[in-house]
Image (cartoon, coloured by chain):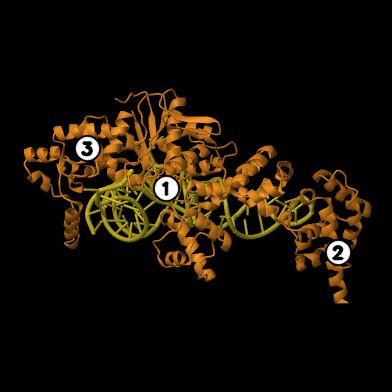
Chain colours: A orange, B yellow
Amino acid sequence: MPIDPNTVITRFAPSPTGHLHIGGARTALLCWAYARRAAAEGHNGRFLLRIEDTDQTRSSESSTKGILEDLAWLGIDWADGPEIDYNGRTIGGDDRNVGPYYQSQRLDLYNEHIAKLIEADHAYPAFETPEELEAKRKEAIDAKVGYKYDRSALDIPREERMKRLEAGDPHVVRLKMPDAPITVHDQILGDVTVGPDEFDDFIIRKRDGFPTYHLAVVVDDALMGVSHVLRGQEHLINTPRHIAIQQALGFEVPTYAHMPLIFNPDGSKMSKRDKDKTAKKAVKEAKLDASPIDGLSDTDFAKWLKDKTRQLPSDQLIALARLLDVHLPEIDVEDFRRAGYLPEALNNYLALLGWNPKAKNEDGTDVERFDMDYLGAHYGFSGMGKGQAKFDRVKLLSFNADAIAELPDEHFAARWRVWATSYDPALCERFSAEDMLMLAPAVKTRCKTLADGRDVVGFAFVEDDAIEFDGKALHKALLKGEAKGLEMLKVFRDEVATIDPFTPDAIEQAVKDFCEKHEVGMGKVAQPLRVAVTGGPVSPPLGQTLAIIGKDAAVARIDRCVAEAEQSLSAKE
RNA sequence: GGCCCCAUCGUCUAGUCAGGUCCAGGACACCAGGUUUUCAUCCUGGUAACGCGGGUUCGAAUCCCGCUGGGGUCACCA
């Protein structure tokens, strides 16, 4: 399909070998944004999703499912590609009739093009075994010269090669690389030229009959009408190979844009292994020598601990982390979701990591906070940075905290509940939907992630008779000086029963009225009360704090606190 | 190691293509102060960068060269 200059089609083509990595999410987001903008500007923009499952040994269906869901959760939807139902919304489809979108279902197409290449002498079968090639590679490395395939398959006369091919001799197919430099006209990096010495005749079809990534990606992009290829910089050096295939097949060369990669703050690659590393370190520090979790035997646990390269499945890592109270670094989109990040905050931060809108707000500051609509209306290659960027969780956290704080109470409550349903069911058991709505204004400004919300109201999860009073806080609020705090608390204790309804507003009002009546500052009453019902000096406003535990619990806790304070007072005397 | 890409506050970046308006602007973090019944939010102010060395030029963050540093890539993975 020739590229219509008025049509912009971008694609994201993950290989389903695991979860969707945060770097992949950024690539997808920007591909989506570019197509969205093209659409808005009348260029028939479409974003396409393709599953690159040509590695039979590593691809899995569950991985595909997870990736599609992660994208949908982020709000990155595709016009063409696997069809899924997400929250009653259908994403994907095959309107242009260029599917299927799974490479494993397109083998005939690849073979057709490979046959053409062989026919035109742009490609040839090679019969060496992997072992033979490995030996040659080793030789080259030992001799400290760069390894290149020596084209020894071409020593076999063409006629004989074709005969062996037809006879079904085990073989791979290699592309005959042209003997000329190839220039990539990159939209972000500019022209990049690579000489012919840098390439050998790479494999385009494996022994198992599956095409390699290089062949499949080129054929699919061409057949699916992909006009703009936006991908990570790790592919830059592959691009001349792809251009060589395009030229051999008579395809148009799409527009390329290679974006910088993202790294950990320490400069290392953001890798799934980071989670494992963190868990191992924590286990070693805790000096555990037996498996503390179900489903993991002591022997496997020991093996894992000893072997740096051995990794535990995600659910076991999470269980370990919970047990040891360590925070695993978020790497995959699912990790961020579990940790209570909002997709809008994640998208905003991800887009800004490498792209700058170069626009000013009314107050003169740079535009940094924006939504998907803004991204889809303004994203372009000219704002892309060229250098690698470090992933700053602290700044992301700030974006997320702001996104949460900006949510109307009803939305916050609803999303908090949806999150908790999947990741913290106990929270839903303790709080009704109404409870969460009532808490919303207090929790919103006090948590940076949805997961943090629980900490803010942690006092509600403690039994009344299990509250541990912070001695320092108790002394400061109730006993200091003339023990005025204790006195006030005792008087207010009886007031509590009269508050009706027992709602945040009514409670706040009751405290205020009480202070006026007794002519004392708010602090004299509020702090003792706070210590009494939460055990410590810090909590959300008293209205929500008392309302969520209820009248009876409030009175019970005050009584316990008073008793404790009086005991400590008499002990002193 | 070969080849390729990159380089402004701790971090993400604006400014670089069209050299002077930049003793370098914004954001996050940090520090100080203010508002507040605690905490958080919020508000005000502050600290902080052109990797190094050569050129070109009246003048360089901006152009050229070298160095250093970081990254990518060298698979029958994608």
Per the image, the residue denoted by label 3 is A244
The answer to whether residue A122 is left or right of residue A363 is: left
Q: Earlier in the sequence, mark 1 or mark 2?
A: 1
Q: Chain of mark 2?
A: A
Q: Is residue A309 above or below residue A221?
A: below
| Mark 3: amino acid | Ala
The residue shown at (83%, 67%) is A564
Q: Chain of mark 1?
A: A
Q: Circle 1: is it few (<14), some (14-19), or many (20+) Cα within 10 Å? A: some
Give the secondary structure at mark 1: loop
Q: Chain of mark 3?
A: A
Q: Earlier in the sequence, mark 2 or mark 3?
A: 3
The answer to whether residue A174 is left or right of residue A271 is: left
Image quarter where the N terminus of chain A lies is: top left
Q: Nearer the viewer, residue A129 or A532?
A: A129
Give the secondary structure at mark 2: helix
Based on the displayed image, in which of its 4 quarters is residue A204 positioned?
A: top left
Q: Circle 2: is it few (<14), some (14-19), or many (20+) Cα within 10 Å? A: many
Q: Nearer the viewer, residue A457 or A362?
A: A457
Q: Is residue A117 visible?
A: yes
Using the numbered discs, state the Cα–Cα distance from disc 3 to disc 1 in whole angstroms.
Answer: 30 Å
Per the image, the residue denoted by label 1 is A18
Q: Nearer the viewer, residue A497 or B33?
A: A497
